[in-house]
Amino acid sequence: MLALLVAQNIAFYVIAALIVFGALRVVTCKNLVHAALWLVLVLAGVAAQYILVAAEFVAITQILVYLGAIVVLFLFGIMLTRAKTGTDTDLDHGSGKKIISGVIGLLLLGIMGYALWDEYRGQEIGNLTVQRTAAVSDSIFSTYLLPFEVISVLLLAALIGAIVLARRD
Amino acid sequence: MTFAWDAPSVDFHALAPEIIVAATLVILLLVDAFTGEDQRWASSSIAGIGLLVALIPIASLAYDGTTRIMFGGGYVVDNYALVLKALFLLSGYVVVLLSTNYIAEGDYWEGEYYQMILASVLGMMVMASARDLVSIFVALELLSIPAYMMAAWRKRDLKSDEAGLKYYLMGVFASAVMLYGMSVIYGYTGSTLLADIAPKIGALATSTPLVTLGIVFVVIGFAFKVSAVPFHTWAPDTYEGAPTPVTAFLAVASKAAGFVALLTLLFVGFWPRHDVWEPLIWVLSAATMFVGNFIALRQTNVIRMLAYSGIAQAGYMLAPLAVAGASPEAASQALHSIVIYLVIYAAMNLGAFAVVLAVARKTRSAESDSFGGLFSYAPGLTVCMSIFLFSLAGIPPAAGWFAKLGIFQALASAGTTSGYVLAVIVALNSVIAFAYYGRLMRIMWMEDAPDGDVSPIRVPWSITAALVLTVGVTLVWGVLPGLVTHFTDPITLLAVGR
C-alpha cells in the first residue's frame, strides 16, 4: 500500500471516530445550543472525509451549505423562538421511548452496516482521481440541465410560500 | 486535462408544456405585484387558462407521436408521459375551479396560492418524464414542498397548521429514507440513469443485500407519498386540517404523482430485481386495503372517510405491481390497469370533493350528519355524489367498475397463486368499502336534514363547472370505457417486455 494511502486510512478512522462521537453528543446533550454546536463537528467531519476522497466540490459545498447556512439557521431558530438557551431537562423522552428508539436505531445500524460490509468487504479503493469542479459544472449544464432549471422554480416557490406562512398579518 | 462542454440539445416542443406552466407562474407573480387587492380574482383565471393552454402542446406532441428522448435518456416524452401530464394538468385545472370561491372568500393569499398549485403541477409534469434519479428526486421535491405549504394555508387555524406540519415532517422523513436508498443504488451502479441502473443491478442471478436495501428504501419513500399502510398516518389529519380544495389536490394529483414515480422506478430502473420488490409491494398492498377500509368504516367525517377510502384505493392500485414480474403480458396489463385507475380515480375523487365543498358552503361542516336530507334541498348534488360513490365502490355504470376490472384482469393474467389471493383480497375489500359508501348514501337520501334547515345551496359556477366535468367523465367512461383505453393502450415503459 502506498504511504499516502496509509496516512489516508489513519485520517479516515480518526475523523470517523470524531463524527460518531459528535453524533452521539448531538442526541444525548441536554443543552440545545450545545447540540447544534456538536452538529458542527459531525458536518465538518463529513466535509473532511470528502476531501480525503478528493471530492473537492462536494467538500466545499458541504461546508458552505451545512456549516455556513444550516447550523447558523438552527442557532438563529433557537435564539429567536426560545428564551431558554441553557440546560433543558424536558428535552428527553421517558425511558420507554428511549429503549424503543434505541432498539430501532441499533436495528437500522445492523441492517445498513451489514449490507454495506457485505458488498464492499475486501475491496480497496485504487488511486484516487481528483473530481474536478469543472467536470461537475460541465455536467450540471449539460446532462443535469433540466433538474438544475427545475430547482430554480422550486426555490422560487419555496420563497413565495415561506413568506406567506411566516409574515405577520 | 481539458474539459469539453457539450451544449445539450434541447427539444423545445417536447418541453413546451412545462415551459408554459412555469411561464404562467411568473406571469401570475408579476400580475400579483402590479395589481391592487380588488383585482385578485384575476389570479385564478390566469392559473386556469395557463393550465389549459399547456394542454395544446401535449395534444400536438401526441398527434406527432414520436418518443422524444433528451439529456442522454434522463428525460423522455412518450405516450406514458403525455397521458399523465394531461391528467396532472386537468386535475390541476379542476382544483383551481374548486379553489376559486373558497380561497377568495376566505381571503387566503390568492395570488400566492395559485402560484403554489402551478409549481406543484410543474413538479408532477417533470416527474412523468423523468427517467433519472436526480430528476425524479428534484421533481418530487418540487411537487411536495408547495403542497406542504398549501396544507398549512389557513394559517390562523390550528388544525391547518397541524396538517401542514405533520405532512411536512413525515414527507421530509420519507424523502430522507428514499434519498439514502437512491445514494446506495447510485454507489452500486455508478449511474443515476434508470436505463443504466437496470442492467447493472440485474447482472447477478440473485440480489445482494445492498441492492435490496436500496430498492426497499426507495419504495418505502414513495409508499409515504401514496399513503400506503403503514406509512399512512399523516394522511387523515392532513386531509382534515388542510383547506378542502388542497385536500382534493393532495388526494388526487399528489398521490397520482407518487404512483407515476413508483411505476417509472419499478418498471424501468428496478425491473430486473422484481423478485425483490414484488413481495414488498404485495404486503404493502394487502395491508393498505384492509387498514384503509376498516378505519374508513368508523369515520363520521366525510373528508376523513374519503381520506381512508383513498388509502384503500391506493392499495388496489398497488396490487397489480405485486404480480407484474410474472410475464411480459402481466407487466403490460399491470401498467395499463394502474394508469387507467389513476385517470378514473382522479375524476371520481375530485368530483366527490367538489360536492363536499359545495355542501360545506351551506353547512360549514364536513360531518356525515350534516349531509342528512341532502336530497330534499339539493337533489342535483345528491345525484352527483351518488354517482361518485357508486364509481368509488366500483358499481356500473360509473367508471369505477372499469378501473376495478382492470385490476382483476392484471392480477389474473399473472396466473400465480399470490396473484389470485390478492384478487380475492381486492374483491373482499370492495365489499367492505361498499358499507361506508352506502351509509353516506343512506344519510343523503333517507334521513332528514339536521334542524330542518332545507334552504337550497347556492353552488358557484366554478364548482358547477368542476362537477359537470367530473360527472361527465365518470359517466361517459363508465358507459364507453373504450374512450379511456384509446388513450392508454399505446402506453409502454422502456423496460417492459424486454
Image (cartoon, rainbow, N blue to C red):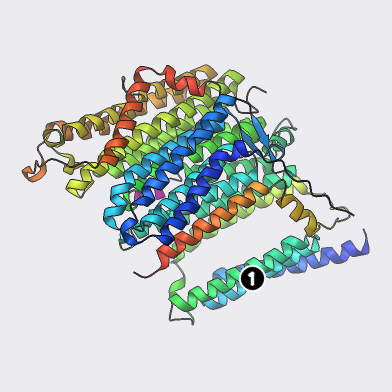
Is A14 included in the stretch rendered in magenta?
no
**Residue bearing mark 1:** A67
Residue B383 in view, yes or no: yes
Quadrant including the C terminus of chain A? bottom left
Name the chain letter of the residue that bears numbered label 1: A
Does B26 appear above or below B432? below
Q: Position of residue A131 (x, y in %)?
A: 81, 56
Image position of B259 with respect to B30: above or below? above
> Could you tell me which residue is drawn at 84 percent across and 58 percent down?
A130
The amino acid on which the numbered mark 1 sits, given as a three-letter code, is Leu
List x then y, in percent, for residue B77: 60, 33
Q: Quadrant of residue B393?
A: top left
Q: Is residue B232 magenta?
A: yes
Q: Is residue B452 left or right of residue B348?
A: left
Viewed as shown, does residue B321 lie left or right of B229?
A: right
Q: Which residues are magenta?
A: B230-237
